Image (spheres, grey):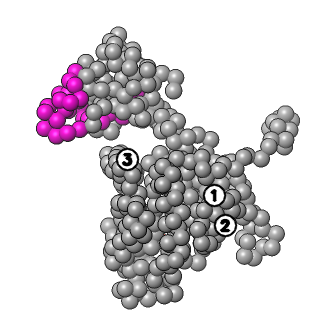
Amino acid sequence: MNARAVNKQQTAKPAAVPKLDQFRRITIKVGSSLLVDHEKGCVRRDWLAALADDIASLHGEGRDILIVSSGSVALGRTVLGLPKGALRLEDSQAAAAVGQIALARLWAEVLGDRMVTAGQILVTFGDTEERQRYLNARETIGRLLDLRAIPVINENDTVATAEIRYGDNDRLAARVATMASADLLILLSDVAGLYTAPPGTDPEAKLIPVVPRVTAEIEAMAGGAASAFSRGGMRTKLEAAKIATTGGTHMLIADGRVAHPVQRIREAALCTWFLTPSNPVTARKKWIGGSLEPRGTVHVDDGAVKAIFGGASLLPAGVKRVEGNFARGDCVVIRDGQGAEIGRGLVAYDAIEAAQIAGRNSREIEKVLGIPGRAEIIHRDDMVVGGE
Ligand code: GLU
């Protein structure tokens, strides 16, 4: 590093702490040790009611909210009379099968009492990593949010296999948050944030309010210890921070043990913010434009070129013909009448369907395909154009 760079680093102002009010779409991860009294195996109802008040007020102000809730195993194991301590995989899956019913009902009731509708989504690792399934999950979440419901998400523990599962809801929540293009992920935890050293044993330990980037030095602070009851320790939280911040989502770790934990964050309670240099839309566009191998081409007419440069989605009416054997969700190149590439995007129809609806009005989609489909062949959010 040259002297100027060192100097610049030393004099750089500390990164500003964002305010909760500036976020539009927030994913809140609720850990099992907060929701369930592990001694008695029952729900901490007063705490949950206070959290639900906080959530309802964020939602009532027009924000989209997603909840990633743990607790199925903790709730189910008591009902089944399983022993305390670590469970074998098949026992935790059985416990999850029993506990998830209660967990979903709990959220439906507690949000319903506040006039908010909950929708349960259980995802596996594959649902977030495999393209077709990722798109399906993303669309369902998007639709629920459009309809002003709150998706309540957990890992589908009963069918997840040992090797291919998240196992902890920190990383799952980060993946869900980026998948839903949330601009903030809150991990409500049994610690207040990331400390310079273990706070329980080191009186010198200081909470770090802002982490602009997860560096090796930051990772070293996390150590290996997991918190007493939840699966994810600080390590998995940092893994989550990496997933969230590279996907364009800010993340914060905050103490969830207090009453009204989200309200406390609003009132600037101590917590650790992990900042993303990007935003969900640009991160996604980078991924579409740079990382995906195109599987085909969509040739469009002059009107469509104009509309696309004006910021619109691509409608079937503007498509002249398609090439390639692409599936729904694949990346395709968009070319103008002269064959020049004007952009790329994720296509909402497979090649055969796209060819059938090319040149048609969106109102005719159902008649042509026999099923209703999206009005856009490539939605604006799924498209990167020119210098974007
Ligand atoms: N999916 C698990 C459950 O609901 C919890 C995973 C975690 O605690 O991170 O019990």
Distance between the alpha carbons at the discs numbered 1 and 3: 25 Å
Which residue type carries mark 3? Asp
* Mark 3 CB within 8 Å of ligand 1: no
For the image, the number of numbered tags is 3
In the rendered image, the vertical position of residue 107 relative to residue 345, given as above or below: below
Q: Secondary structure at mark 1?
A: helix
Percent position of residue 252, x then y: 61, 57
Q: Which residue in the rendered view is the most extreme toward the top?
A: 338
Residue where numbered disc 1 is placed: 266
Range covered by the magenta-colored residues: 344-373
The amino acid at mark 2 is: Ala
Q: Which residue is mark 3?
A: 146
Percent coordinates x, y for residue 242 in the rendering = 58, 52
- Is disc 3 placed on a helix, strand or loop? helix
Q: Quadrant of residue 10?
A: top right
Q: Position of residue 234 (x, y in %)?
A: 62, 65
Give the residue number, with chain letter if any, for mark 2: 192
**Mark 1 and mark 3 residues within 8 Å of each other at the beta carbon:** no
Sequence-wise first label, 1 or 3 = 3
Disc 2: CA contacts within 10 A as few (<14), some (14-19) or many (>=20): many
